[in-house]
Amino acid sequence: MAVRLTELRLQNYRSFEDARLPLSDLTIVIGENASGKSTLIDAIEFLRDAVVDSLPFALERRGGFQGVLRRGRDGEAPRVLRLAITFELDVLRVSRSLVPPRGYSSDPRADVVVIVDDANVRELRRARGLYGLAVRPRGDGRGYEVIEEHCRSDSDELDGFSRDAQKIRPSRSADHADPVADPERLHLAIGTGALDSIASVAQRAVRGLRASRPTWTAITSPQPVGSPSALAPDGSNLGDVISDWHQLNVERVYDWVMARLERIAPGIVDVRATTHVGRRYIEFEQDHGKDGRHALPGEAMSHGTARSLGILLALRYRERFGSRSLVCIDEIEESIHHGALAVLLEAADATTRGSPAGLRTVSPEPILAIPEPPSDYHPPGPQVLVTTHSTELLSHPLVTAERVRIVKWVEGRSEVFLVADGVREALVPPETVGGLESINALFPADEPLRTPENFFEIGP
Amino acid sequence: MTRKRIAAIVEGQGEVDAVPALIRQWLTQNNLHARWQLVTEKAVCAKGQANLLAPLQPAFQRGVEYFVNAALRADPDFLLIVLDADDACRERARKNEQPLGAHVLERARAVAGHKEIGVVIADREFEAWFLHHRTAVVPTCPAAQAWQPTREIEAIRDCKKVLEGWLGSYAPTADQARLAKRLPLAEGAKSPSRSFQKLHKELSRLLP
């Protein structure tokens, strides 16, 4: 997917009062216990839940609006919860003469937004976009209301929308506004057909947010039979996903996962799911040398192997008709041997680089195909965010100071910092981020990362 | 006004929090927070005296120079190095070598000559300061108040064990910073511990 998330912004979300998390291809978030690392992933999941399911559902899962809103001091005016993601996307302007008039069918894994132009042009360029929302408690103290929602880009050609408590306005038709149908729901959660191009891209980007914190219990317990969909964060539908191995292997997911799992747990040669009386059971096959291969039940799998399997699938598995923009892995090192951590980190890095594939399009006007992409165009895979405490993982050469964000609990709130310039500039191999972290010399920058004065501005 | 910056380098996990706690206490007592700030809440940790005093080997994170260089990346104006003497001071004296404090200072200056550097060698260990100042550090512990050292406190090899006897348990990572905050830094110049006097003297350099 050529949409690249650039930043998450939060205000008054749980322990965060005002923070900004820049996102790289591979982002490594570090920090002490209870500093707020997992809350960042929760905020990302919250955005997805609110758009894919509904805002009421996303809040209910988190104990209601008061469960996510950072509390103010006594007597202070009620705070406003604000969340936003910013992103970059490819926009192809192409002459109408190059495009067949009809026959386009929407591909949900679109890479490029196409603008069909009357001028004789063919130009691929980057545009920037933002989607964000603001929610506050109702005046009567019961419930909440959405008071702002924005989806915009810095390109005049891409239409978005802005919403206040009463009206929704398309960004290119300032004189036209529709009343807000439901103050407790998001406009972006409405079907794609009703949305303009930048909103379609934002919707796909938000739908593509994934969290992964697999547990041995969820993976190895009998699971109800469902249809393969997004892998559940705890791996509790992993049986559905791997029961579909053959289809998955269209994209060589099985080979990719097993090649890495064999390095993590030598001797494992197969993992499969069986079905009995409406339940999925994970089984795996292990090579016992001269004693042959043995099929073993999922419960016999070690905690680290089960978690590794869940993480590898989260990195690689894409449900049919789905897309992934960012895969977040919480505490990647839990139960996992440090040697296996290197395999998982390299798998995460490989995931971000994607693979050569056809260019897919979404267009405000119907087209069948677009001309050949530029020869240097290479659609990347999803971005990956990893939280960790592991100095072993941080000592891997893939972990550069540029990729690291430090989350700290400072004066009663969580803050996000970049690594200090002095550390970034002087860090050259064989010295590593993990080595500096282990001696408390991975200094954060002096100032935490704050949101812009206008929370919903796209940025400089 | 731009605040000047202090970084600390220590050798043990307990001092990682304890030394910054002492510095913060000093800044507070002397109303210096507007002039000075700690670069981080935790001190740079050499993870053992042997690592700190070893010849420079950056690839293995060894040597005073390595840790000073690491601390310099936080752009400090003042570097405070605190380590336990253990037997090193006596050993060096026996061998007629340069005193430990001067040795560490010389090596630190070789890579950070443009910075203010203070070196404090706790004799024989940081916890000896707690024993010297037991009245302030554990005022409600009858065993501590009744305790009479039978020899020089600096000659005690395991001050942690004495603290454990008083408190029931003592773990540097859990207790050292908490107890360090109670050390009477303001009266440090009159401390019965010469190394604590030295700490007071080094911190006094932060005064205007």
Image (cartoon, coloured by chain):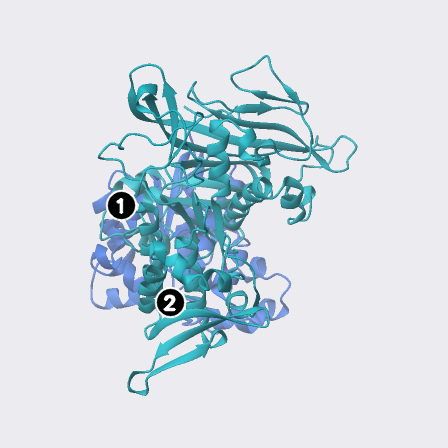
Chain colours: A cyan, B blue
> Quarter holding the N terminus of chain A?
top left
Protein chain holding label 1: A
Q: Measured from the top left, where is residue A378 in percent x and y?
A: 28, 39
Q: Is mark 1 on a helix, strand or loop?
A: loop
Residue drawn at x 67%, y 47% as measured from the top left? A60
Density class for disc 2 (Cα within 10 Å; few <14, some 14-19, many ≥20) is: some
Q: Measured from the top left, where is residue B148 in percent x and y?
A: 54, 71
Q: What residue is shown with label 1?
A: A427
Residue drawn at x 28%, y 61% as measured from the top left? B51
Q: Quadrant of residue A134?
A: top right
Q: What residue is shown with label 2?
A: A337
Q: Is mark 2 on a helix, strand or loop?
A: loop
What amino acid is at disc 1?
A: Leu
* Left or right side of A388 for B114: left
Q: Nearer the viewer, residue A142 or B34?
A: A142
Q: In which quarter of the image is residue A102?
A: top left
Residue drawn at x 60%, y 71% as measured from the top left? B143
Q: Which of A369 and A47 is in front in this view?
A: A369
Protein chain holding label 2: A
